[in-house]
Amino acid sequence: MFPYYATKEKFIDDFEHGHLISHLDGELQHTLDGRVDIAEIASWRNSSAYVFIVLNHPDVPDTIEIGMEYVAEQIQGDRPKRVDAVLAGYNSEHEKCMILLELKQYSNLEYKEEEPDQDKKFVNVWRTLEKKCNPFYQIDQYREMISQYNSMIYDTGDVEIPDGIKKDHIKRVVFFHNLDKNKLDVLTSRQIEETEYADAVFFEGEIGKFRNYVIENVGADMENDVLKFFNKGEPPAGKFEDILPEIFRGEFESGRRDQRKCAEELKALIDGESRKIVLVKGGPGSGKSVVALQLFKHCIDRGIDVKFLVGGSAFLNYLKVPLNELISDDVRSSFMYPKYCKTAMEGGDFPEVIIWDELHRSKTDDFHDVFLNQDEENRARLLIAFYDEDQAYCSDCLCEADLRTEGVNENAAWGFETYTLDSQFRCHSDQGYLSWLDRKLYNRVSEIKRSNLIFDFDVIDSEEELCEMLRDTDSQYVVLAGLLEGENSEVKDIMLHDSSGNNLVIHSYMKFKNSYLDRYGETLPAERSVFVKNTVIEEEMYYGDLNSIHGVETENAIVIIGNELIYDGNMVRCSEEAFDSEKFRKNLLCLRGVNNYRGRDLTDEEKNQLEKYLKNIYKVLLTRAFKTCRVYCRDERLRDFLKEE
C-alpha cells in the first residue's frame, strides 16, 4: 500500500504547504503500530526535499505520479520493507514504466573486500557479506518482490500481458543526494559502475541528470494510472476458501505482519496456563477468520479441547463444504452455534478453549450462557473472540463492553487483552478503500480520494444500466441487497425497469430457500446455501441480504442501496421511511411490544442507533468483493455523493 500517493502537481502543493510529512507520519504510525521515530521523520523531510527539487521543473510533465514509503506487507519479518519512493508514468515509447527509488543520505561510501567487524554497525559502509545493508541489493529485492506479488508484471519474452508492465521497465535507482561522487575511491567507483543490482545511480550535484532520467523513463505527457495499476496484483493470500486447505494441512503462514504476530502470540497463550478473555478486533477482510482457524488447528494439533463458535449461519454454511473434505467428523463437530455449545456444556462437555468468530453476530445472552454463567472450574480457560464494531447490526449484539465484565475481572485469575488486525485481504487489498468508505458512510476523517482507490469501485448511474449489467452473465456478479424498500419482507422480489419496457426480476434468496423446503421437504443443503457461488440458480437471479452474505466473499458484487439511506447534502442519513419502519424498530433496535415500536416517535438516541446499524449493514455488503464492486442507489443524491472524491 501507499501511505502517500499523488500526481506531481499534488505532491508539490503538499510539500510546499507542509502536508506531505504530516500525512506520511499519520498513515505510517497507524500502519506500523506507532513505530515511526523522530529520526525517520527528519529523514523524510530531507529526502523528500530532493524529490521535490527534481520534479518541480517545467520540463517534468504534470502527469507523473509519485508514491511515498510503499509498504510491502507481504515481506516476512517483524517490520515490513518499504520503498522510499516510486515514480510512475509512460516512457518515450509510450510503455508503462516505474522508477523504484532508494534515497540515501550517506556522506561517504566504501566498498570493502574483507569481512567487516560484526560488533560494529557501519552505517555508511557498503557491506559485501550482509547484503541487507547494501542499497543496490535492497532496490533489486524490492523489484523481485513486486514482480512476484503483482500478476500483471511479466518478464520480456514469449509471454506478454496486454495491460501489464514489463519487469525490465521497473527501473532500480539509488540516489545518494548528500554524497560527492568525486570523493569515492577507485575500487568503490568501479563496483558501483559494474553493479547488476541497479539501473541507475545518482549523486550530489546530479539533480539535472536525474531529472532527465525521470523524463526519459516516466515523462511521456499522457494520461497516467500506472501506480493505481501497480497495486492491482492478486491479493497476497488469496480467497478464504482457497486458504482453508493450507490451514488444515498446516502449510499456511500469513505474510501479513499483524496477522502473523497475533497468531503467534495467541498460540503461545493457548500453550500456557493463562486465564483470559482475548478480543481480536479488525475490519472486514482483515483476516480475523484466518487467524481464528489457525488457532483452532493449533488446538487440535496439541490435543486441547476446543470449541469453534460462529455467530452467523451464513459463515458456518460457507465453511461446511470445504471442511467436509479437510477434517474428520470429530473435529468438524467442534464447529457450532453458541446455543449448541450451551447444550454440550449442560451435558458435561466443558472446553478448555473457546474460539468465537463473528462475535458481532452473537447476542449478549450467548456470552452469559457459554462463559459468564459457568462455574469457575468449568469455565473455559481462554475465550478468544473476533469482533468488528462496524458489523454489529442490532442493539442486542455483543459488544466489547459486554466482555469487559466485572463478573470475570474481579477474579485476578482472569485477564483481558485486545489485539487489532489492520490488513485488508478483500477489495484488492486496498486499505484506503475502507478509509474512504468510512468517510462516506460515517463522516469520519480520511485523506483518501476516490480517484486514488486501488479497488475497482464504481457507481451505476441508472436502473437501465443496472439491468444491462445484471443481464451480462459473463460478469458473474453477486447481487447484494441490504434491507431495501421500506418494509421489505424476506420473500420480496426486486423489480427493475429499463427503457425497453422489459422488467428484470431478482428474487429473494430466502424465497428460494423456502421454496426448496416446500418442494423437497428438507432444508437447503450446505453446498447450495452458499449463495455467493453464483447469482443464477435454476435460470433465475437471486439477491442476498445481510443474513446470506455475512462473513463470506465473492469476486464481483453489485450492491443495491434501498430507500432507507439518503444523502441530505451534508452526510449520509436515514430516511423518514426507515425511521417509521416497524421491521427496523423490531429487528434492529430490538423494540418489543406495541407501545415500544408502533405509533410513537423514536428518541434521538434510537434514531442514532438505527442509523448506525443500517450503515453497518451496508458496510458489510460493500466489502464482500475481491475484484469489483458496483453500487446502485435509489436516492439520486446519494449516487452523486458516492461519485465524488
Image: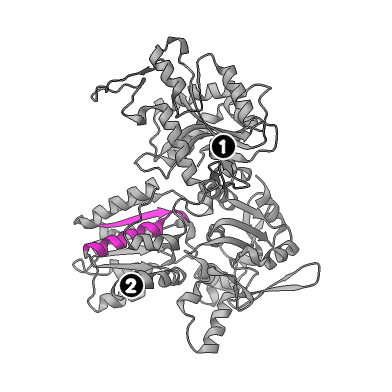
Quarter holding the C terminus? top right
- Res 61 → quadrant: top right
| Three-letter amino acid code at the position of disc 2 | Arg
Q: How many marks?
A: 2
- Horizontal side of 566 relative to 239 (left or right) equals right
Q: Which residue occupies the foreground of this view, 207 or 192?
A: 192
Q: Which residue occupies the foreground of this view, 645 or 532?
A: 532
Against 404, residue 61 (above or below) is above
- Res 195 → quadrant: top left
Q: Which residue occupies the foreground of this view, 494 or 81?
A: 81
Instruction: Judge whether residue 301 is colored magenta.
Output: yes
Mark 2 crowdedness (10 Å alpha carbons): few <14, some 14-19, many ≥20: some
Q: Position of residue 233 (x, y in %)?
A: 53, 48
Q: Residue at x 50, y 50 (%)?
A: 429
Q: Which residue occupies the foreground of this view, 633 or 334?
A: 334
Q: Position of residue 60 (x, y in %)?
A: 66, 25
- Res 487 → quadrant: bottom right
**Which span is picked out in magenta?**
274-302
Q: Which residue is mark 1?
A: 5
- Horizontal side of 72 relative to 462 (left or right) equals left
Asked which secondary structure carries label 1, the reply is strand
Q: Which residue is mark 2?
A: 332
Q: Residue furthest front?
A: 158
Q: Residue at x 60, y 52 (%)?
A: 456
